[in-house]
Image (cartoon, rainbow, N blue to C red):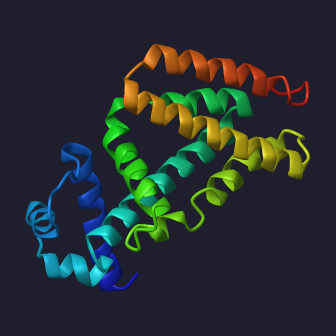
Amino acid sequence: MTEAGAGKERLLRAALEYVAANGVGERSLRQIAAALGTSHRMLIYHFGSKEGLLVELARAMEERQRDLLAELAATDDPIEAGRRFWAQLADPALWPHERLFFELYGRALQGDPGALPLLDGVVDAWVTALAAPLERAGVAPEIARAQARLGVAVGRGLLLDLLATGDRAGVDAAMEQFVGLYAATLPSSTG
C-alpha cells in the first residue's frame, strides 16, 4: 500500500471510530477534520468532499458487516448465521453507522451527487454475500440470489424500523418470523 493509501486508511479508521462515538449531524468537514487531528484539506485530498468521506464510511462499515457475515456463514448453517448476524446488526453500538447509511441512501435516492456513489453495488454486494452460503447449502443459484435479495430487503426494512422506533422486541420477533419462513424454503439438510 502506498503512503497516501495508508494515510487514507488511517483517516478512514479514525473517522469510523469518531462517527460511531459522535455521529455526524451537522458537523462541517473542518469540524470533523479537527476532531480527527487532521486538516479539512487532507480529507478533501483523500475523499473529495464531506459527502465523499461519508460514502466511504458507509462502504467501509458495510464491508465490515459483509466480512462478519462471511465469517459466520463459514461456521454455521445459513439460518443460524442469519440469526447471529441479525443480533450483530441490531446492536445499538452500530446505530450511528446505520443511521448514516440510511441518511446517505435517502440522499442518493433523491439524486444528491455527493451521495450517488453509495448506490453503486449497494444491493448487489449484499445479494452476492448472502447467496453464497445458500448455494453451498444446495439452493440453486437463481433461487439463492432471489432469496438473498429478499433477505436484504427484509433486513434493511427491519433495521430501519428498529432505528425509527427502538422497538427491539418487536423487530426481533418479526425477524424470527422471517427466519422461520426462510428456513422452510431451504433444503431439508439445512436450518
> Which quadrant of the figure contains the N terminus?
bottom left
User: Left or right of 147: which side holds 38?
Assistant: left
Query: Is residue 137 placed above or below 188 in the rendered structure?
Result: below
Residue 26 falls in image quadrant: bottom left
Q: Which residue does the image show at 69% across and 46% down from the upper left?
A: 130
> Which quadrant of the figure contains the C terminus?
top right
Residue 159 vs residue 56, the one in the foreground: 159
Residue 6 visible in the snapshot: yes
Residue 158: % across, % down: 53, 31
Q: Which residue does the image show at 49% across and 60% down from the upper left?
A: 109
Q: Which residue does the image show at 91% across and 24% down from the upper left?
A: 188
Query: Is residue 79 placed above or below 169 in the rendered structure?
Result: below
Residue 170 vs residue 43, the one in the foreground: 170
Query: Is residue 143 placed above or below 42 in the rendered structure?
Result: above
Q: Which residue does the image show at 29% across and 55% down from the upper left?
A: 16
Residue 2 falls in image quadrant: bottom left
Query: Is residue 31 placed above or below 176 in the rendered structure?
Result: below
User: Left or right of 176: which side holds 15?
Assistant: left
Residue 10: % across, % down: 27, 68
Give the number of marks: 0
For the view shown, which residue lies furthest in the front direction? 110
Residue 6: % across, % down: 32, 76
Residue 83: % across, % down: 61, 26
Residue 91 visible in the snapshot: no
